[in-house]
Image: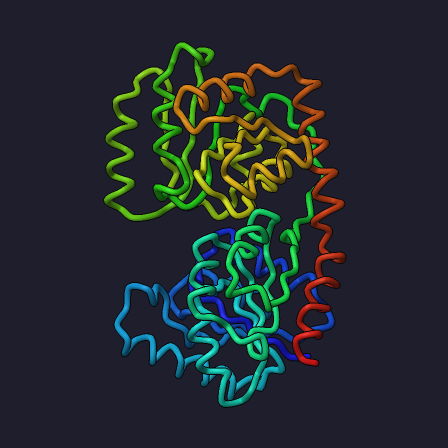
Amino acid sequence: MRVLVIEPAGQLWGSERALLDMIESVAEIEFAVCCPPDGPLLQELLRRGTRALPYFISELHRKSRWRRLVAVFGVLRAIFAFRPDVLHVNQAGAYRVALSASRPFHIPVVCHVRLFEDVSYLAARRPNPERLKSMIAISGAVAEEIASFPALAAIPVHKLYDAYQPVSLPETPGRRKQNLIVCAGRIAAIKGQEVLISALAHSSKFPPGTECLIAGNGESSYIARLKQKASESEDVAIKWLGFIEDIFAVLRSAGVLACPSHREPLGRVVFEAWNAGAVPVVFAGAGGSAEIVAAADGGLVYDEQTPECLAHALSKAMALECAEKDRLIANGRAWMKKECAPEQYGRAVAAVLERACT
């Protein structure tokens, strides 16, 4: 079976890393990826030997109708070059473009739903179940969001947590700083970094020498505003790292992952924290990140999205006894091995894609 993946962003954020893991997990399928020509994903695909067709246009939501039409022709070009049996839309926001290009060839479409906002977008399109064969929800929280829209009721939904293979944790005495907090991910209002910065201003709650590393990129004006706010906190040192490709190495040096997202469909960074040996701290109302931490009993979940509540949770995480920290990390890693095993995930994704072709 030949599967053409439509990847609209072309970055190396969680959605694209999950895509790379998916391609590695499904050995019996031939993949090609239609993506933008100007992002880091293209180079990573080429490095891995995956066929890349760089004909998509990034940030279409900011572009004109003409550019959207050009994107449709880009997908058509990829279809002509690869001759797929099914189109896999890695981020559902590209569904409309993929549907327009696939319609003349009656190619079935499967959508990965990785963002809450993409659910309402899909519902507004009122997809035909003869064209959109199924949706893959990356968490129970996303599946529940899909179920709340009657326009999507006829489309089969498969809940599949992204594949993730934890590595062995080597002993590195002296490298980990238990009072080091890491916050990693796209820098945007929905990700809650502003709540974290306000929480860090409650210096009396934190032990001396507490530091925070913020990794990620986003809108420059928003980052500038956050940096200005962070400069007002003198007691907790905050360092801005920008985009970090190997976040595992950063998390290996930290005791705590702060995941203060207001809404988080899954929270791949939680997997990375468990993999690296850091304790995740997540907001109970976020959705996917709280779902997996609670299911695994693998971290701390705080109830109110306030700086005070987050500060209390972070200080509690830093104060945990070593045995309790080890238990939480072990629980998270055991949950990943059960729910995110690449071989198991590969079989499940292959079954969804094969069913779409029947």
* Res. 213 image quadrant: top left
Q: Is residue 85 left or right of residue 259?
A: right
Vertical relation: 53 (above or below) 136: below
The image quadrant where one finds the N terminus is bottom right
Q: Residue at x 34, y 25 (%)?
A: 198
Q: Who is closer to the viewer here, 127 or 214?
A: 127
Q: Who is closer to the viewer here, 223 or 162?
A: 162
Q: Is residue 86 left or right of residue 94?
A: right
* Res. 136 image quadrant: bottom right
Give the percent coordinates (x, y) of residue 27.
72, 68
Q: Residue at x 37, y 30 (%)?
A: 195
Q: Residue at x 56, y 62 (%)?
A: 112
Give the percent coordinates (x, y) of residue 310.
45, 24
Vertical relation: 68 (above or below) 10: below
Q: Who is closer to the viewer here, 71 or 175?
A: 71
- The furthest residue to the front: 150
Query: Is the image coloured rainbow, by chain, by secondary structure, or in one colour?
Result: rainbow
Give the percent coordinates (x, y) of residue 148.
53, 54
Labels in figure, total: 0
Give the percent coordinates (x, y) of residue 313.
51, 21
The image quadrant where one finds the C terminus is bottom right
Q: Residue at x 57, y 71 (%)?
A: 88
